[in-house]
Image (spheres, rainbow, N blue to C red):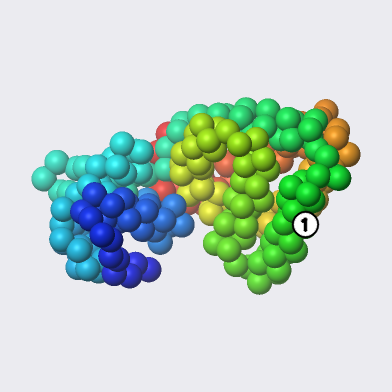
Amino acid sequence: MGLNSISSPNRKTLGKVAYDKIREEIITLNFKPGQMLSESELASVLGVSRTPIREAFLMLLQEELLEILPQRGARIALISVKKVEEARFVRESLEISAFKSVARNWNADDLRYKEIQEKAFELIGKQQKAASKGENIEFLQLDETFHQIFLELLENQTLISVVSQMRGHLNRMRYLELKTPNHMENVVSQHQSILKAIFSNNEEETEKLLRHHFSHKKDELPQVIEMYSDYFIS
């Protein structure tokens, strides 16, 4: 278990902190799909009472990352193929629209855009290093940041919130995808092509490349399900 003790100035915030910690363990597959969770064990590891753990469990139930089995307790939800497909559709639709808007309005002379451009190149460099070392968790975190910096240009908090929620269900799947051959290298190459389209104000090319970017991941789903069949439910 990769958890450490937590602290917070009030109980309500402590429940949210516990939720964030447990959720991260679920998303990164340190807690496996189908694994049982103990309130008392988590409370002991995190150094809190069971009340914040219960609050965290309620939030995870609402997000469908946790389920309660009668007379058995809490269990990490299996990865729902249907939920993954639904989340992927929503994220793809929103991000394509967002990235097209970014491409349309890209202004290389604007300081803010220059900063984003520098950050994007920096992230790709770090992704290449993470890929070469096989650092899956670091790679996916960098991938999330790459997409996030462009979404934030639109200053649409509703968009960011919805996409973030969709990633919760997708990322367990994506951590498994990263184990397939050449996946990380392909993602880096796709990111580089997307950047060129954005910096050229080419909306059409940006959309085309993003659709390929997302469909490439979708094509790997059957292979991942076959490799980790115990983690999935239809």
Q: Is residue 79 above or below residue 35?
A: above
Residue sitting nearer the eye, 113 or 92: 113
Q: Is residue 195 visible?
A: yes
Left or right of 45? Residue 153 is: right
Of the 4 image quadrants, the one containing the N terminus is bottom left
Q: Quadrant of residue 215?
A: top right
Say which residue appears at 77% left-offset and 46% top-offset: 113
Q: Is residue 197 visible?
A: no
Please provide percent x and percent y for residue 138. Answer: 58, 63
Q: Is residue 52 above or below residue 225?
A: below
The residue identified by callout 1 is 118
Q: Quadrant of residue 206?
A: top right
Say which residue appears at 80% left-offset and 30% top-offset: 104
Say which residue appears at 45% left-offset and 47% top-offset: 229
Please provide percent x and percent y for residue 97. Answer: 68, 28
Farthest residue, direction left: 71
Please provide percent x and percent y for residue 107. Answer: 83, 40
Q: Under tag 1, what secondary structure?
A: helix
- Residue type pointed to by label 1: Glu
Please provide percent x and percent y for residue 54. Answer: 19, 49
Residue sitting nearer the eye, 123 or 109: 109
Residue sitting nearer the eye, 234 or 56: 56
